[in-house]
Amino acid sequence: MTDSTAPKSFIHEIVEEHNRTGRFGGRVHTRFPPEPNGYLHIGHAKSICLNFGLAQHYGGLTNLRFDDTNPTKEEQEYIDAIKEDVRWLGFDWHAELYASDYFGQLYEWAVELIRKGLAYVDDLSPDEIRAYRGSLTEPGRNSPHRGRSISENLDLFERMKAGEFDEESRVLRARIDMASPIINLRDPVMYRILKASHPRTGDAWCIYPTYDWAHGQSDSIEGITHSICTLEFENHRPLYEWFIQSLGIHAPQQIEFARLNLSHTVVSKRKLLRLVNEGHVSGWDDPRMPTLSGLRRRGVRPEALRAFAERIGVAKANSTIDVALLEHTLREDLEDSAPRAMAVLRPLKVILDNFPEDKVEWFDVDFYRHAENREELRRVPLTREIYIEQDDFMENPPPKYFRLAPGQEVRLMNACLAACTGVEKDAAGVVTAVHCTYDPASLGGQAPDGRRVKGTIHWVSAPHAVPAEVRLYNPLFAVENPEEAPEGEDFIANLNPQSLEVVTALLEPALAQVRPGDRYQFVRSGYFFADPQDSAPGKPVFNRIVGLRDSWAKQQK
C-alpha cells in the first residue's frame, strides 16, 4: 500500500476484504479498457484515476487494453490519442494490450461453448432478434434455429469465419434462457459478421466478438483481479460471470461505480463525434470540449483533474456534478502556481493630462502570491496614455460604485492615484477616452496624506501595450442538462451561441515573449493559458482556463 492516508471508497473496502480472505492471493491487477472510437473525456479521467490509483494504492498493476472489436469505428488516431492522454494525466501502464490479441483464443472458446451445447448459430436478422428478445415485462421467445445440432452449429460457425455468409445473415448466440428476467441473459450475441479490415489484424477475420463476449474473457486471460466498470454495466455482470463459469477460467470480480455526469456537458462519444463532424467545434481538442485533449488545450493541468476526481469520490448511485465544482478545483490548482499579470480585455483609453508626454515611470512589481514561487520582479511602465477595462468606467454610476467616474478617484494598481476630470465621445455619444489627473506624490500607489481610495483598477501603458488574441470560453451548452432538448429537437438545440468570444486584448509588455504553454492570472479577470499551437513569441494567443468568479465557493458558505 503506497498511501494509507488516501480516502477509501466502497471499492477499496471490497479489495481489502479480498486481500483479507486471500481471494486473489493478495494481488490487485486492474485495467483501463477504452474502445478506440473517439477521444477520452473527463468521465474517462475519473475511471483512469480510479483504476490506476487503486492498483498503486495496493502495490498492484494496471493494464491499458484497447477494446478494438469493431473495426468499422476504430482508428489508430484514437489509439495514439488515448495513450497520450493517459500519460498526460500522470499514469503509465504495466502492459499495452488489445482485445484483438485474443481473437484466436476467443474463437476457440466459442467453439468450446458450441461443443457444450451452450452456443448456436442463429439466422434471425437483427430486427428479428430484438423482437424475439421480449421486454422487461414479457419473456423472450426461442429462435427457430435454437435447436440446431452441435455438428451443424460447428459447421456454420466455421463457414461464418471463412467468409461464406453476408453481413447480418447469421450470428453466434449463447444458449442461456430466453425467459430470464435479466434481458442480457436472453441468448446474447457473441459474434457478428463484419467484412471490414481491422487496424491490427487486417483481413484475417470477418467475424468479430461483441463487447460482452470479449470483455470478461480478456480480463480473465490477463489475470485481472478487479474489473472496474461504470454503473451501466451492472446488468451485464450476470452474463460476465456466466461466460467465465461456463468456460471454467480465472474469474475476476466485476465492480460497478457511478460514471461522471457533469452539468452543461455531454460525454457520450457518439455525441462528441457529431459535434466534431458537424463543425460545431473546431475539433476533438477544442477547448470547449470535455475531452482530455480539449481540457489540455484550454490549459487545465493534470494535477487539477486528479484532484477533481479525488474530490468527487466514487459512488454507487448516478448523480450530476455541478460544473462549478470543477471550476472551483481549477482555481485552487492555479491560485498559487500562476503568476499574475495585467491585461485589458476590452480597452478604454485614459489620458493622464498632467503626466509629462515624454515621461515613462517604471515600477518594479511582484506579481507572485507566495515567496516560494517568486522568480524576479517585473518592470511595468506608466505613461501619459494608458488603457483600462471598459467596465471600470461609468459616466453615470450607481451608488457605491468605486471604480472610475467623473469626479471620482481610483488607484491605478501599483502605480498612482488618478481622478476623472472629463470624457471624449464620438458622434453616437459613446465614450472613446477618459481624461484624468494623477497625483505625482502617490507614485507607487499609496496616498501621501493617508486618504482612503476604495477603488483599485488595473491598466496597461498605451505605447508599451502588447496586442494579443484572447479566447474567452464559456460552457458549450446553455442549459444544465443538455440531454433534455426541446420537444422534437436533439441536444444540438441546446448549444450555447456565446460559448466562444474572441477579443483583442492589450497586455503588459513583459508578456510579449510569453512561451506557448505558460499560464497567468490576468488580475481581476481569470486564469489564462498561452495556446500551445497558435501562440508564438511576439504574437501571443491566450485561452481562458477559468474566470475568477467562484460560484461554488459561495454556495458552500
Image (cartoon, helix red, strand yellow):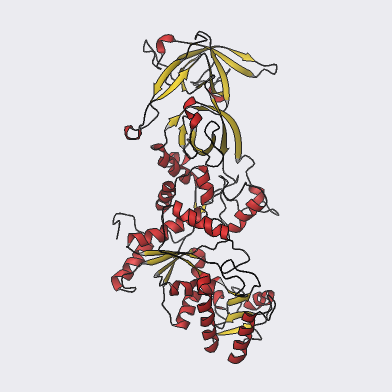
Q: Quadrant of the C terminus?
A: top left
In x, y percent, where is residue 275? Answer: 63, 51
Residue at the image point whose x is 43% and y is 17% from the top = 362
Q: Tell me if residue 129 comes above or below residue 511 in the rendering.
A: below
Q: Nearer the viewer, residue 541 or 486?
A: 541
Q: Tell me if residue 239 comes above or below residue 501 in the rendering.
A: below
Q: Quadrant of the N terminus?
A: bottom left
Q: Is residue 134 visible?
A: no
Q: How many marks?
A: 0
Left or right: 525 in relation to 199: left
In x, y percent, where is residue 279? Answer: 66, 48
Residue at the image point whose x is 62% and y is 80% from the top = 161
Residue at the image point whose x is 43% and y is 46% from the top = 304
Q: Nearer the viewer, residue 329 or 490?
A: 329
Residue at the image point whose x is 54% and y is 37% from the top = 535
Q: Is residue 31 visible?
A: yes
In x, y percent, where is residue 339? Answer: 42, 33
Q: Tell me if residue 541 comes above or below residue 489 in the rendering.
A: above
Q: Nearer the viewer, residue 6 or 209?
A: 209
Quarter location, residue 488: bottom right
In x, y percent, where is residue 67? Answer: 53, 67
